[in-house]
Image: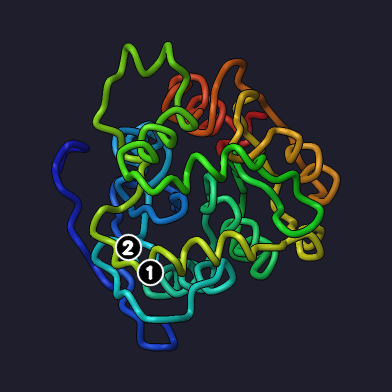
């Protein structure tokens, strides 16, 4: 199987009965890749292959997205974190590396804090601790994303994800704009889950060495959150990508993936 072929779907079942679709590819130490809010595993298309020299990669469709069940309730970053553990248990994996971006970074925080023995190394990208301590996006960003015109909201989201120069050279399609097949109740559930995330008190329980990556022009998750995460997680190192917005992992893929691979391999 090549990295351009469709991934086979396999399912694990959460304690509440929700079927969770996951995808595994490659050989080596397991690396869980966690996508952003209202997105499925396609968030990582074209990027996961960067890790296959050293890792096998595991993605999952968050409940409410992709081929996973879409229950009416039960959406929270804590539940998403437990869903990750469900998939690891299903695969018989005791310990893994975890790389989460955006809301996936929020989920990754709780996986590492609530299950420290299950996470060897942790990468957090374009994310925040949530809650009252976090630096939130400003009101203009929220208004732009809440426009009643779907196409205008989509253009605003693309602008928040990618710099104009990168968009000009990469006109899409983009994998980071949400799962178009999500039902409205699941989309609302994801929004509430992300908005209600607050890991501030849990973060000091993270024992895994942690790399924090962020675009310095990120208005979705302002980069001031990097220093907040550093202040709470015991063993951290950071890197900011000049000029990058929320989707630094695509726009700065060569450098970002190389940094993550080196970190996961214990080189930095």
Name the residue beneath numbered marker 2.
Answer: 65
Task: Tell me if 214 is positioned left or right of 199 in this view.
Answer: left
| Residue at 62% across, 16% down | 242
Which quarter shows the N terminus?
top left
Marking on residue 19: none
Under tag 1, what secondary structure? helix
Q: Point out the frontmost of discs 2 and 1.
A: 1
Reply above or below: 107 against 53: below
| Number of residues whose C-alpha sits closer than 10 Å to that of mark 1, classed few (under 14), some (14–19) or many (20 or more) | many
Which quarter shows the C terminus?
top right
On the image, which quarter does residue 224 sit in? top right
| Residue at 34% across, 61% down | 61
Measure how far apart labels 2 and 1 are at the Cα level: 8 Å
Q: How did the renderer colour the structure?
A: rainbow
Nearer to us in this view, 38 or 185 = 185
- Do the CB atoms of the residues marked 2 and 1 lie less than 8 Å apart? yes
The first of marks 2 and 1 along the sequence is 2
Whole-percent x and y of residue 26? 30, 45
| Residue at 34% across, 13% down | 168
| Residue at 43% across, 33% down | 156
Name the residue beneath numbered marker 1.
Answer: 186
Task: Tell me if 50 is positioned left or right of 224 in this view.
Answer: left
Can residue 52 be seen?
no
Reply above or below: 92 against 108: below
């Amino acid at each position: 199987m090549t990295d351009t072929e469709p991934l086979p779907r396999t399912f694990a079942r959460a304690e509440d009965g929700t079927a969770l679709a996951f995808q595994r590819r490659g050989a080596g130490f397991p690396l869980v890749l966690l996508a952003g809010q209202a997105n499925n595993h396609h968030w990582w298309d074209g990027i996961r292959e960067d890790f296959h020299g050293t890792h096998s990669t595991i993605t999952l469709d968050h409940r409410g997205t992709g081929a996973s069940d879409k229950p009416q309730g039960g959406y929270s970053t804590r539940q998403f974190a437990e869903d990750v553990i469900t998939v690891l248990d299903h695969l018989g994996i005791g310990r893994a590396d975890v790389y989460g971006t955006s809301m996936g970074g929020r989920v990754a925080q709780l996986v590492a804090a609530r299950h420290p023995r299950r996470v060897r190394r942790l990468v957090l990208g374009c994310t925040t601790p949530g809650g009252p301590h976090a630096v939130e996006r400003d009101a203009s960003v929220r208004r732009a994303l809440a426009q009643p015109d779907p196409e205008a909201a989509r253009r605003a989201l693309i602008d928040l994800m990618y710099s104009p120069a990168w968009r000009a050279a990469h006109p899409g399609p983009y994998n980071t704009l949400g799962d178009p097949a999500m039902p409205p109740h699941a989309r609302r559930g994801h929004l509430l889950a992300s908005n209600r995330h607050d890991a501030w008190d849990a973060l000091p329980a993270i024992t895994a060495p942690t790399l924090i990556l962020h675009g310095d022009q990120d208005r979705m998750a302002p980069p001031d959150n990097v220093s907040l995460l550093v202040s709470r997680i015991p063993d951290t190192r950071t890197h900011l990508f000049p000029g990058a917005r929320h989707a630094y992992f695509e726009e700065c893929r060569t450098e970002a993936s190389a940094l993550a691979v080196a970190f996961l391999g214990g080189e930095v």
